[in-house]
Image: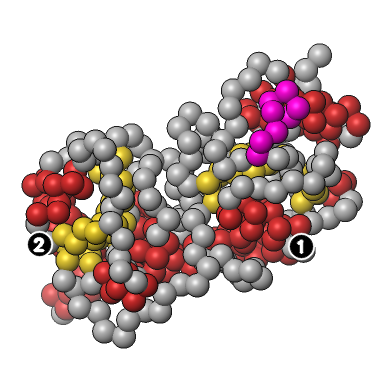
Amino acid sequence: MACFSVLFCLLFSLFFIIAQSKPAILLNTSPYLSPTTILNYQKMVQNFKVFIYKPNKPFNYTTQAESLFYATLQNSHFVTHNAEEANLFFVPFSPDLSLRSLARFIGNLRTDLPYWNRALGADHFFLSCDGLGHDSNRNVVELKKNSVQISCFPAAGGYFIPHKDLTLPPIVYNPHALPENRTVRFLGYVRHKAVTSPSLIDELVNYREFCVETEPSDETTFAERLSSSKFCLFEYGNDVSWIGEALRFGCVPVMIADRPVNDLPFVDVLRWQELAVFLRSERVLGELKHVLHNTWRDRGERMKRSGAAASKHFVWNEKPEPLDSFNTVMYQLWLRRHTVRYARAE
């Protein structure tokens, strides 16, 4: 009887441990940093308000991502004409506006309206694909230091402040159809633009485990390449426009860089350490293959599923849809609405 009691206690304890650990196991397959992401997203959709300042004169952004974001923002339900109810303020200005003219524009906002001075611009945001350069003028300094800068990915070195600034994901208008049958043929796929200096990717051309090409012959071939590869290799700073497609097709991104990558799209939302592999650019070929084989064996299938779930955030729509690129960028702005109220300068 005593043995039975001990056995019962052991089985009950084991059941309790498994029951307690099950949510954690499920959470590990989620692409999100927080289990409350979807709930908080719904709150954002209902409550977020943005006031848009009037630019000095009409202008156009120079990139598709900026233009689409700005046009979508202007026509969205997030916009309010009552600045008093706004959570954040958008500062629109032309990409080719000189820093002197930009300083004058911010100075006018400071003088004519009360909102900039309340937080010295910390509850403001702006678009600048290449990033805002350095300047000694107080107005430009506050805009760069305090306001949220939305850049294009990858952001220009030196012009991006992690934990404050955001990046727009590359545009994917019409995602390729997923192949019905997936046959894995390659350890890694590289869509490689020719570079003048030697790189790790240059060494992969001679290895059959890797598919390296400058450009696929057509969209169908591109889709087949992604779906038949375990990993997709990206040299940070070169062409990363297809990272969303790689995630969608279950091709785990491998970011090869000589420094930490801190400007990934949706870095406040997605668990990038579970979605991608990060390697230093000085890795030799043998070490690269070893890391990729081990990663796929230990967590490749899980990363593939998480990436497919995360890929919906990389889709741009002419008319926004829930959790698409535009709305996820807005969600990241929503997360920044509780700004630090800096002491007003004398």
Q: Where residue 243 sits: x, y (%)?
A: 39, 58
Q: Where residue 331 sits: x, y (%)?
A: 62, 56
Which comes sooner in the sequence, label 2 or label 1?
Answer: 1
Q: Which mark is residue 210?
A: none
Q: Would residue 218 be found to the left or right of residue 267 on screen?
A: left
> Foreground: 143 or 101?
101
Q: Residue at x 8, y 47 (%)?
A: 286
> Foreground: 52 or 19?
52
Q: Would residue 122 be found to the left or right of residue 107 on screen?
A: left
Quarter of image, res 216: bottom left
Measure the C-alpha gap from mark 2 to mark 1: 49 Å
Q: Amino acid at mark 2?
A: Arg
Q: Residue furthest top?
A: 346
Quarter of image, res 219: bottom left
Above or below: residue 338 compared with residue 41:
above
Look at the image and tell me in which quarter the N terminus lies. Answer: bottom left
For residue 26, say whether it is visible.
no
Q: Is residue 29 magenta?
A: no
What residue span does the magenta drawing correspond to? Answer: 95-102
Q: Where residue 335 sits: x, y (%)?
A: 62, 49
Q: Residue at x 77, y 51 (%)?
A: 50
Q: Which residue is mark 2?
A: 208
Q: Amino acid at mark 1?
A: Asn
Q: Residue at x 30, y 69 (%)?
A: 217
Q: Would residue 140 be found to the left or right of residue 156 on screen?
A: right
Q: Residue at x 21, y 40 (%)?
A: 199
Which color scheme did the rendering employ for the protein? secondary structure
SS for tag 2? loop
Q: Would residue 93 be found to the left or right of residue 241 on screen?
A: right
Q: Where residue 101 sits: x, y (%)?
A: 76, 27
Q: Which residue is mark 1?
A: 75
